[in-house]
Image (spheres, coloured by chain):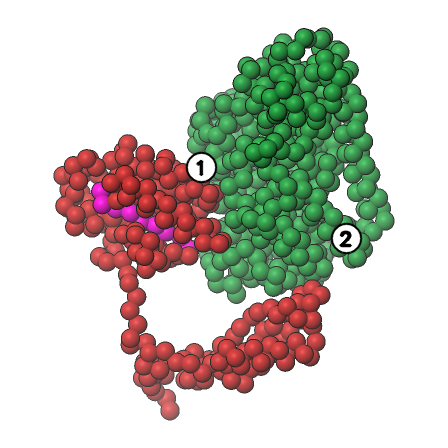
Amino acid sequence: MTSKLNLDAKVVASARQHAANIAHDMQDFIDRHTTVSTERTIVRLLGVDGVDEVDNPLPNVLVDHIKEAGALPTGAAYLIGNAIVQTGKTPQEIAEDVAAGKLELTKLATCSQEEAAEALKPAIKATFERIDAQKAKREEYLNTIGEGKEPYIYVIVATGNIYEDVVQAQAAARQGADIIAVIRTTAQSLLDYVPYGATTEGFGGTYATQENFRIMRKALDEVGEELGRYIRLCNYSSGMCMPEIAAMGALERLDVMLNDAIYGILFRDINMQRTLVDQFMSRVIIGYCGIIFNSGEDNYLTTDDAIEAAHTVTASQFINEQFAVLANIPEEQMGLGHAFEMDPNTEDGFLLELAQAQMAREIFPKARLKYMPPTKFMTGNIFKGHLQDALFNLATVWTNQSLLLTGMLTEAIHTPLMQDRYLAIENAKYIFNNCRHIGEEMEFKQGGICQTRAQEVLAKADELLAEVESNGLFDTIEKGIFGGVKRPFDGGHGLEGVCTKGENYFNPFIALFMDHE
Amino acid sequence: MTTCATTQVDLTKVKPYGDALNDGKVQLAFTLPVPYGEEAEECAKQYAKKLGLEEPNVAYYCELTTGYTFFNVYGNATPTIDYTAIVVPKVEGDVLDRVACGEWIGENIGRDITVVGASIESDAHTVGIDAIFQMKGFHGHFGLERFKNVVPYNMGSQVPCEKLIAKAKEVNADAILVSQTVTQKDIHIMNLTKLVELLEAEGLRDKVILACGGPRISHELAQELGYDAGFGSGKYAEHVMSFVMQEVQKRGWEKKANIADR
């Protein structure tokens, strides 16, 4: 592809190489560690589900039991495999026995690692059959009823009640939405467990639970069949339970998941060691399951300046791309994030936004770029807000973005009303249709404002990546380079759930999930 | 008739203005949970009349989804308000700009003023607290980190009330600033109330200046909840700091940098 912005391919390659080195460096750290949430993910993937009599999820009960016995470095896979060998029970029965205080995993006789791995095979097989069936079902839908064309129209529902969410989501799909994201209740990212069952109470969103995923999946399949268009479901594989939620998404056929360790570190103050280890486990699952992951770079611009800090977004996209490569995620599933967040009073601001959006498209040509609408400078003046969103929609279609987080005129006032979503989708569709091929028709002036801007941002991103490579990613985050937010290596939530892997440790799922085209 | 409209306004009987005084023009956009059709249009018209609009005109309506219809309605409002009788509680004192605030503190307080801020409890939004604290500020209004003679601590979001209070004690804060963005189901009221109750329980309530802010927060609401001041949208770091520093002087805390002395 020739660059319309006249970007220097050598600078792009240099930036990408720095990012690859950064990711490899981190991967060495990741490979040596595990976390309580990664272990709970293994437990879930072995078929353990449900809660004990005081509503503690059984995966937590089991992994807490292991941790209290000081056996976290051995890992849940060996201990459950061993328990199967010693007791002949299933992982679910073992979890129930542990919850009832009838079984202590670390007090059993021990088998070899090979025997434990062998004993896990039936449970693993059952899980992969379920996941593969979900993948096949998505393929079947895409091949029969089809899908909307890109940019996919992505809207949120956030009522707090999953049944009310269903009404809103189906209405949004009928109005033209291609992707429905169920916003989580505001405090969920810091919960160190995943709540269980259908929920009807949340603040600013609805709990991510496996049952809620199932309810919404069913509703979207129904409305998709009615409309003759597959409706994708999005939720959050992020926060303290990042990989567990990825596993739930795999089992319940989610299509898009927000997943970005750096976002969690910066904006939710989750410990960096914890969430980088968790991110790897979640990304191998996401890669295998055909889920598009969304990274959270767009958020940097809500705390940092969209003009001055544009290169930090690009640099972070390169890093997220390389983390995804290490988890064997195809480019088409990389939903790298960026945003339209410049101060609307900026002269030629639209040209700068357009340049950056086009630059992201050229650097990541196959990625499913996720483009975020104005939020920071939305004021409550809904009439101007609708126009700001219109300019955003124009940049989106012009630069061929993939996922349009549809801007709402009532941003900064309330979570979207049914009519807000209608007006927002109408705005996007009008502009997409009227300007469908504008990107193919228009070229950028040689040495003009747009080309100069994009080249400048790319060069600064490359410089920053070189600096991150020499300092390491941990150090960079400690210094507050991303989003202007500083986070310490040993600070934040969840550090107590991280440990170095022991001698007998194994995670049977990594290799199996990595094994796909 | 070329006189300015305002000269003819009877401020004891004010109603909306479209293009002629007292025409009462208002525009409404709303949704009714009824199927699209002529009955829906009539329903919207009747509803507008019940809201006190004369000659309602359904300018546009369409189906949002089966069973829901959206309307854009114009009408002439009939009620009037006595503008002269309105009283709005406001934060007292003068508002100085950033540089003047720094100088004022230097001259009048003679020591640094310490403020601690956070978006508390379940609220994960940092946008409000960052607008007040961060060096960069918001919309060209620099944050407290760029003020002279001010020592700011921004604890970020999802900070438990207990942790915020502990920090205020640790650094001998003159003021605690709380941001709340999420207001669904009045969660902000619950969070803000919790902080006041904890401060009272610890005997600290009158030993710190307590202010809150957010898009849905007014000075009046803040005072009802037991705060000294509330700052809504359009208020920046200089508004907050102007209030805090004058309050420090009013309370005679110039030589009382330590909470224990107040």
Q: Mark 1 lies on which chain?
A: A
Q: Quadrant of the N terminus of chain A?
A: top right
Q: At 33% from the left edge and 53% from the top edge, which residue is drawn? A: B225
| Residue in front for this viewpoint, B200 or A494 | B200
Q: In this view, does A371 lie above or below B71?
A: above
Q: Which of marks 2 and 1 is nearer the N terminus?
A: 2
**Residue at the bottom extreme?**
B1
Crowd rating for badge 1 (residues with CA inside 10 Å; few <14, some 14–19, many 20+): some
| Residue in front for this viewpoint, A40 or A486 | A40
Determine which residue is flagged by label 2: A222
Determine which residue is flagged by label 1: A484
Q: In which quarter of the image is the C terminus of chain A?
A: top right
* Residue A321 image offset from top left, x and y in percent: 64, 32
Q: What element carries label 2?
A: helix
The colour applied to the residues of chain A in this rendering is green
Amino acid at the residue labelled 2:
Glu
Q: Do labels 2 and 1 share a chain?
A: yes
* Residue B193 image offset from top left, x and y in percent: 36, 49
Q: Which of marks 2 and 1 is in front?
A: 2
The colour applied to the residues of chain B in this rendering is red
* Residue bounds of the magenta highlight: B206-215
* Residue B188 image offset from top left, x and y in percent: 42, 50
| Residue in front for this viewpoint, A44 or B246 | A44
Q: Mark 2 lies on which chain?
A: A
* Residue A83 image offset from top left, x and y in percent: 69, 16
Per the rendering, the mark at residue A113 is: none
Q: At 46% from the left edge and 43% from the top edge, which residue is drawn? A: B122
